[in-house]
């Protein structure tokens, strides 16, 4: 009987460990970096896209790549299109960061449409044209991914009083200066 119970627990563990509920954060940088930046973002937010185009590349070059800073990109969708795009970014762990960056860099290519259905069609076309290996319908309808994203939003509002995007948290303190590379650099240099 003990052997049968052990086998059941082992099999159950295998199935539960592959669950999306245990999804990992989308992270850029080394896990053991001295400084952790949490970026609460919405994929349809133009200011978030600007962060990825204008600030993140220099931040990555100067602080992330050398191992000084780790950035956790957390979901804070402001509308249904951002919510669905977050599901897509979160769906393929091996390509999540690449997908996230592509969605921000090419935001104008997929954020179009008057209805959620039109926006989803444009998102699906964009993902397919980029060649990402994603089962679009499965990802959009995955309740565990949905819960993961909604929990990011809830935790951001509760723990850091996030109410707009992008909101930057550095070592668990809200960054309250104007969001530009110069201000970020000054703050980070003080923490190194």
Image (spheres, rainbow, N blue to C red):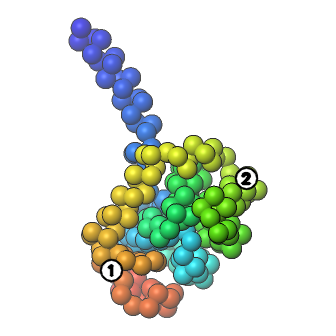
Q: Quadrant of residue 6?
A: top left
Q: Is residue 96 above or below residue 104?
A: above
- Tell me the tag on residue 128: 2
Q: Residue at x 27, y 69 (%)?
A: 158
Tell me the distance, in whole angstroms, between the alpha carbons under discs 2 and 1: 36 Å
Instruction: Determine crowd level at label 1: few under 14, some 14-19, many 20+ residues with C-alpha closer than 10 A.
Output: some
Q: Position of residue 97 (x, y in %)?
A: 56, 60
Q: Position of residue 82 (x, y in %)?
A: 53, 65
Which residue bears the numbered disc 1? Answer: 174
- Tell me the tag on residue 15: none
Depth check: give the residue in front, 15 or 188: 15
Instruction: Determine crowd level at label 2: few under 14, some 14-19, many 20+ residues with C-alpha closer than 10 A.
Output: some
Q: Position of residue 150 (x, y in %)?
A: 39, 58
Depth check: give the residue in front, 101 or 141: 141
Depth check: give the residue in front, 108 or 11: 108
Residue extending furthest toward the front: 115
Q: Position of residue 155 (x, y in %)?
A: 31, 64
Q: Is residue 69 left or right of residue 3?
A: right
Q: Secondary structure at mark 2?
A: helix
Q: Is residue 49 above or below residue 110?
A: below
Q: Is residue 170 above or below residue 125?
A: below
Mark in the foreground, 2 or 1: 2
Of the numbered discs 2 and 1, the one sitting upstream in the chain is 2
């Amino acid at each position: 009987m003990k052997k049968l119970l052990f086998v059941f627990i082992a099999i159950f563990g295998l199935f539960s460990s592959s669950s999306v509920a245990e999804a990992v954060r989308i992270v850029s940088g080394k896990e053991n970096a001295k400084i952790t930046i949490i970026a609460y973002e919405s994929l349809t937010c133009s200011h978030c896209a600007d962060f990825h185009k204008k600030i993140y590349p220099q931040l990555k070059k100067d602080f992330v790549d050398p191992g000084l800073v780790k950035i956790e990109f957390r979901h804070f969708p402001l509308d249904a299109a951002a919510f669905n795009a977050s599901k897509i970014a979160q769906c393929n762990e091996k390509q999540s960061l690449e997908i996230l960056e592509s969605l921000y860099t090419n935001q104008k290519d997929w954020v179009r449409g008057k209805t959620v259905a039109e926006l989803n069609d444009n998102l699906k076309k964009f993902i397919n044209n980029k060649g990402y290996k994603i089962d679009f319908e499965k990802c959009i309808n995955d309740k565990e991914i949905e819960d993961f994203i909604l929990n990011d939003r809830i935790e951001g509002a509760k723990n850091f009083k996030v109410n707009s995007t992008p909101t930057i948290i550095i070592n668990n303190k809200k960054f309250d200066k104007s969001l530009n590379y110069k201000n970020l650099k000054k703050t980070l240099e003080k923490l190194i």
